[in-house]
Image (cartoon, coloured by chain):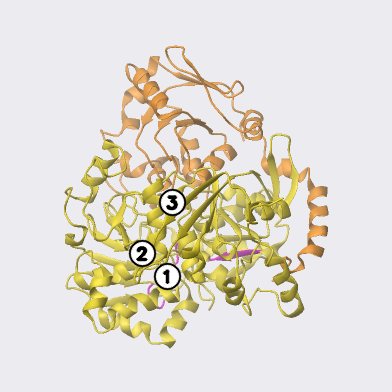
Chain colours: A orange, B yellow
Amino acid sequence: MDRFETLTAVAAPLLRANIDTDAIIPSREMKTVSKTGLADGLFAGWRYTEIGGRDPEPSFVLNWPAYANAQILLGGENFGCGSSREHAVWALHEYGIRSILAPSFAPIFYNNCVRNGIVPVPLEGDIVRALAAQVARDPQSNPIVVDLAAQRVVAPDGTQYPFQIGREARDMLLEGLDAIDLTLKSAAAIAAFQRRDRDLRPWIYLEKP
Amino acid sequence: MATTLFEKIWAQHLVDETADGTALIAIDRVFLHERTGSVALKSLSAAGRQVQDPARVFCTMDHIVDTTPGRGDDTRVPGGRAFIIETRAAAQAAGINLIDVRDPDQGIVHVISPELAIVLPGTTIVCPDSHTCTQGAIGAFAWGIGSTEAEHAMATGTLRIAKPRTLRVRFDGALAPGVTAKDLSLLLISQHGSVGGNGHVVEYAGSAVTALDIEARLTLCNMATEFSAVSGFIAPDDKTFEYLHGRRYAPKGAMWDRALLHWRELVSDQGASFDREIALDVSELAPMITWGTSPQHAVPITARVPTAADSGTTAEAYGRAMNYMGLVPGQAMQDLPIDAAFIGSCTNSRLSDLRRAAQLLRGRQVAAGVKAICVPGSMSVKRAAEAEGLDAVFRAAGFEWRESGCSMCFYAGGESFGHGERVVSTTNRNFESRQGPQTRTHIASPETVAASAVMGRLADARSLARAA
């Protein structure tokens, strides 16, 4: 996973509530057993004029030249709800999105972001809408700053908004750590737990298939 | 000190803790399916990592597999065959338990895991599937994860997670005839919103929950994810133990007795404190149905389509949902004509669900022009239903009778309901285009779906039952 450096980028608004992972990457766009090749399918149902087609839908915000190269999304409540599919996050990342600012996130989606180098930033709805309004005047010259190390977002007008993130999640994003590598450092503790647990709950441990 | 059930399960699985409160939690069972598990297995193997304990990892084929009779590896989902074949190969290479397309135990992961007693009280079980919370009904901490987290669980036998807060939801009162666990779920989400459970694990309790049988409890816990909760669960009791006894992976003999002693401790102590509590009196509850495009957009079947003011949502979301669903404020829900009816999914596809629907369908016909489909949740449910003649009831009424799988709970590019069609469905999500491009989904109980199929419009099953 890449290290997350302080991000200064164009932010695109998708402010509706309950944007689900099937809207982010429709199931029909998950064509192979792979974590890549998904960016074209991102928001396919909204982004293209027809199902399975690739003609851009002019009304969809990510198709507007003003929001070209957006790396930040401004979202609504319960962002990433629905299916657990990590393909939604892989598609966002491959498209270039590095941070999402929204009032709340679905829990599985939130964790998938952290595991893939996308910073989920919880901010009150009023703040997200105010950011969208500032950006909208001229998105290319009004970027938003996401400073993860300092846990703050800087609006185009210079206003700073602090945000919450768990320390481990923050460190993993900043340092680009792999969670499995980190956990394997605790291999001895895991082995000791399993030895104890086999005595306490032997029925948990099954015969080889 | 009085502790909650969740805290007991958490403490029993705590391997290690970091300074900021992130915990390393032991994972007892991992379940995979061909849609999201395949990529986890492939990626794990590509990284040169091993499944730490393959005996405790299970994989089924449910999401992409076709549900028409005589099916094999071919499916109408684009690229679907490759998912099935690659999942099989990866599962075999990893040496995990594979429940393949033609296996007599095949079925939807959250139906077969309890059926085979893969999930047990007090266990931690994860699956790269959001409805894993269903299995909390057995008294387990069961939750959905991403594929990367599934790799982590398989490689290390653990997950790194922040401890969620606890929320107890009490449903008290006796449910009226024709009112079910599905209606409890929809009531909770409609009253407290689709983010009402965010950051929490939910313990469902109260006299209405204790009275539910195990299959109904699975229905209740199924939609904790639609409440944005990390998971939902119910303390195990004698009904749970009786349900599990003798099933394939349940402990046997003296080991059963030993496990039972442990399981009987799995309750929230008297006086244990939760971070939040919600209490709902459900003695007057009517069957619920959704009108909009979020599970929180639910009303009693006897109600009218809400106005913006009483919709419990923002004007923008209300307008969008009304437009998408093709509704007029104030029209009676029961005046809405339907094009299709679907009975199935990890929410409502178990034997008791099919029995209750069949009871209403016996001697009746699906209305002309309504496409009606029943998909049992597992091959075991299908066989049991056929043994008591339920398949004949569904077929005679005009329902298609399928092989088990997730089927048309969601649209994956293969089979779907038509553009703009109105579908009444026992599933869990009424999102835009969930069951097909521009499909309008109303979610409800099997009773409501069966009655609506017969009437050709959304219908109150209690009126139909009385008319018999």
Looking at the rendered image, the quarter that the C terminus of chain A falls into is: bottom right
Q: Which residue is mark 3?
A: B226
What residue sits 30% from the left and 34% below the top? A60
The Cα atoms of the two marked residues, 1 and 2, are separated by 8 Å
Left or right, B45 with respect to B239, comes to right
Q: Estimate how packed mark 2 is, as few (under 14), some (14 to 19) or many (20 or more) residues with alpha carbons within 10 Å.
A: many
Q: Which residue is mark 1?
A: B349
Amino acid found under the numbered disc labelled 3: Glu
Secondary structure state at the residue bearing disc 2: loop
Residue range corresponding to the magenta coloring:
B57-70
Amino acid found under the numbered disc labelled 1: Ser
Say if the magenta span includes residue B60. Answer: yes
Sequence-first disc among 2 and 3: 3
Viewer-side residue, B2 vs B168: B2
Q: Which residue is mark 2?
A: B426
The Cα atoms of the two marked residues, 3 and 1, are separated by 18 Å
Viewer-side residue, A96 vs B439: B439
Secondary structure state at the residue bearing disc 1: loop
Residues under numbered marks 1 and 2 in contact, where contact means CB atoms less than 8 Å apart: yes
Expressed as whole percent of the image width and height from the top left, the position of residue B145 reads: 56, 50
Marks 1 and 2 on same chain:
yes
Main SS, magenta region, reads loop
The image quarter in which residue B423 lies: bottom left
Say if the magenta span includes residue B404. Answer: no
Q: Is residue B311 above or below residue A158?
A: below
Left or right, B361 with respect to B112, comes to left
The Cα atoms of the two marked residues, 2 and 3, are separated by 14 Å
What residue sits 48% from the left and 73% below the top? B378
Looking at the rendered image, the quarter that the N terminus of chain A falls into is: top right
